[in-house]
Amino acid sequence: MPKSTFFNLPEEKRNQIVQVALEEFADHDYASVSISRIVARAGIAKGSFYQYFAGKADLLHYLMDRMAEAKTRMLSLDRPDPHHVGVFAYLRWLLRVSATFELANPLMSRAAYRIATTAPEELMAPHLETAFTFYKQLVALGKEQGDIAPEIDDDLAAFLFTTFLTEFTRYLIDKIVAVHGSGWQGKQAIVEFPEFRRLFEQALWVLEHGLAAHPDGTGTDGIRLERAEQG
């Protein structure tokens, strides 16, 4: 995390450093991110940078926390309670809001995606663990409510939720941009596109029916055995 000297800077200067750093991380793989470029564009001495941050990894963690805070603020708006609406209805809301956040914050989204796909695993582990723990709790709630089959492995389901909410949002946006270009951003909500609604509902159907408890009580083990016998 930043040293106290960073927070002694005027807010405008702190925001400028963050903006330049986000652009650097969005435009370059982690290994190619340059502190020299960041300080040159931010108008600070390289020695001053190391008075604010321990190094590139420290800056990465701070940016990830800033992006998580921004997303959390959006998620807090009109947030449904998964205890009341059910796990899959909650996931449906979460995915829509995640897509909206990515479109409203394209620089953050690009930086987050570039970091997630190029940063060393040991740097990403604490951030991934936080998301994984949240989704594992959601899986436990789903089993308690009967939305998720009890024999489903908790870690597997949490992994599917984590991957689905991160990768699928990006996939949807890329599909829309490929068909319509990027000129619609800021003029039309992504949920208004038929392609978005179609892929969105198909993906949720696959996820829900793959993890759901079955009325006959067989669950996934029963389906697997039935298919094996047919083979």
Image (spheres, rainbow, N blue to C red):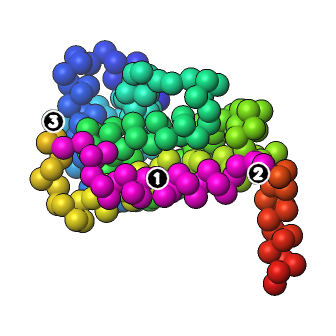
Q: Nearer the viewer, residue 78 or 2?
A: 78
Q: CA distance from mark 3 to mark 2?
A: 61 Å
**Residue position for label 3:** 43
**Residue position for label 1:** 201
The secondary structure type at the circle numbered 3 is: loop
Instruction: Give the number of callouts.
Output: 3
What residue do we see at 61% from left, 24% from top?
Answer: 84
Q: CA distance from mark 3 to mark 1?
A: 47 Å
Residue 39 visible, this orientation: no
- In the image, the segment drawn in magenta is 188-215
Inspect the image, locate mark 3, and give the three-letter code of the amino acid beneath it.
Answer: Gly
The secondary structure type at the circle numbered 2 is: loop
What residue do we see at 27% from left, 46% from top?
Answer: 192
Inspect the image, locate mark 2, and give the three-letter code of the amino acid beneath it.
Answer: His
Label located before the other in sequence (3 or 1): 3
The secondary structure type at the circle numbered 1 is: helix
Disc 3 residue crowd, few under 14, some 14–19, many 20+, Cα 10 Å: few
Against 101, residue 196 (above or below) is: below
